[in-house]
Image: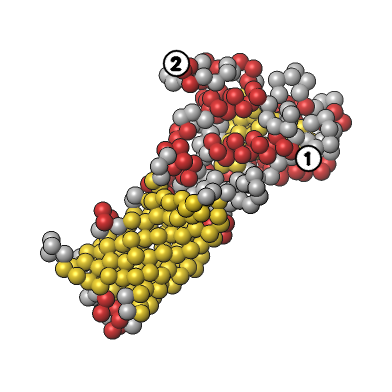
Amino acid sequence: MSTQETTTLAPAGTWRLDPVHSTVGFEIAYLAGTFKGEFREVESTLEIADDGANLSGTARVASVDVKDENLATHLQSPDFFDAERHPELRFAAERIALDGEMVSVDGEITIRGVTKPVTVSGTATPALSDPYGNERVGFALGATVDRTDFGIDWNLPLPTGGPALADEVTIVAELQFVKAD
Amino acid sequence: MTILGISGSLRRDSHNTRALRAAADYLGDGVALEVWDGLKAIPPYDEDDDGPAAPAAVVELRSAIAGADAVLFATPEYNASIPGQLKNALDWVSRPLATNELRNKPVAVIGASTGMFGAVWSQAELRKVLKTIGARVVEDGVAVTSAPSRFDEQGKLVDEELCAQLEAVLGHLVGEARTRAEDQAVIAA
């Protein structure tokens, strides 16, 4: 992100996450459709400076939210995210490229203790004043990774052949930040 | 450090129980094997009987697992799968799923058979069940084939290749248990 582009998006400063109006989750092809889950406990910080912007965040694995309690328990086990040994997912990026309201972020994502480079892309909603006196900026981001690169190998064979669960998973994040100062 | 040993066979002269006891020779200093022998007393799973008044044999099994740093299973193969009695015991242990005693517990699976395959299908099934329960499953196993010829009169495993495999599996199991103990010590501090 160049200085001009950064400051066009939002003023320099520290921006804190509005967790109520933000969502971090995943989408993955499973059986005949797309299965979606969410992490209810997320933290993120956006630092905008004159020379660029940094975006970082974490999601607590133990807060994974799906529509079945036993499935949530399974997702936290060593068979999937291994919440005991790797309690957080992490993301960090120090350079954000903007093309108008399109965002492309080269960063690093850590899942199950494995860190890999990742390109996150999506859109940004430039800073606006909300009805409560805050300056607010938003991002709708997504990144596709191969879960097996992070040691998440669970699968079941379909009777007709092929796996029940895809390897590619899309991490999705709808983030709203409020200017902290 | 304590490794709980659970044999899936009830038979007095079980090859799997023998393999389990043979494992004690490969655990190293400071690691003890405790073989649990209460499998026959576990009643058929019935959710109506579970809870605070769970059967005494089930309470004993849950307590034994909770008190161990890791669990080593030795399973025969009945009709290409896990013996019903062992699966039934794991069904008891698995409830409630989110807090069951096997959750995050390091476990390993070995197996023995009189034939040429060493219960490999049953071992794979057992690993699948243990992963679903939430255990921390060591991926490698030992397939003791032609079991009657693999032990001496003292019950020692005499096949060098199988001895090496058993030593490797137990090394991984103890390593997982030590890592978990270290992680928990850090959290406690």
Please say if the residues under marks 1 and 2 sit with CB atoms less than 8 Å apart.
Answer: no
Q: Quadrant of the C terminus of chain A?
A: bottom left
The amino acid sitting under disc 1 is Cys
**Is the residue A121 above or below the residue A3 in the image?**
above
Chain under callout 1: B
At 41% from the left edge and 50% from the top edge, which residue is drawn? Answer: A37
SS of the residue under disc 2: loop
Marks 1 and 2, the one that precedes in the sequence:
2
Q: Quadrant of the N terminus of chain A?
A: bottom left
Q: Is residue A132 visible?
A: yes
SS of the residue under disc 1: helix
Residue under label 2, please give it: B53
**Is the residue A162 above or below the residue B6 in the image?**
below
Please state which of residues A142 and B68 is positioned toward the viewer in this rendering.
A142
Would you identify the image quadrant in which residue B14 lies? Answer: top right
Side of B162 where B9 appears, left or right: left
At 59% from the left edge and 36% from the top edge, which residue is drawn? Answer: B130
**Is the residue A18 above or below the residue B134 in the image?**
below
Please state which of residues B28 and B76 is positioned toward the viewer in this rendering.
B76
Task: Categorize mark 2 by other alpha carbons within 10 Å: few (<14), some (14-19), many (20+).
Answer: few
Residue B184 coordinates in the image, percent (x, y): 46, 43
Instruction: Give the CA distance from mark 1 to mark 2.
Output: 42 Å
Q: Which mark is residue A165?
A: none
**Is the residue B1 above or below the residue A12 in the image?**
above
Side of A87 where B2 appears, left or right: right
Residue A138 coordinates in the image, percent (x, y): 28, 66
Chain under callout 2: B
At 66% from the left edge and 36% from the top edge, which residue is drawn? Answer: B125
The amino acid sitting under disc 2 is Ala
Residue under label 1, please give it: B163
At 64% from the left edge and 35% from the top edge, which residue is drawn? Answer: B126
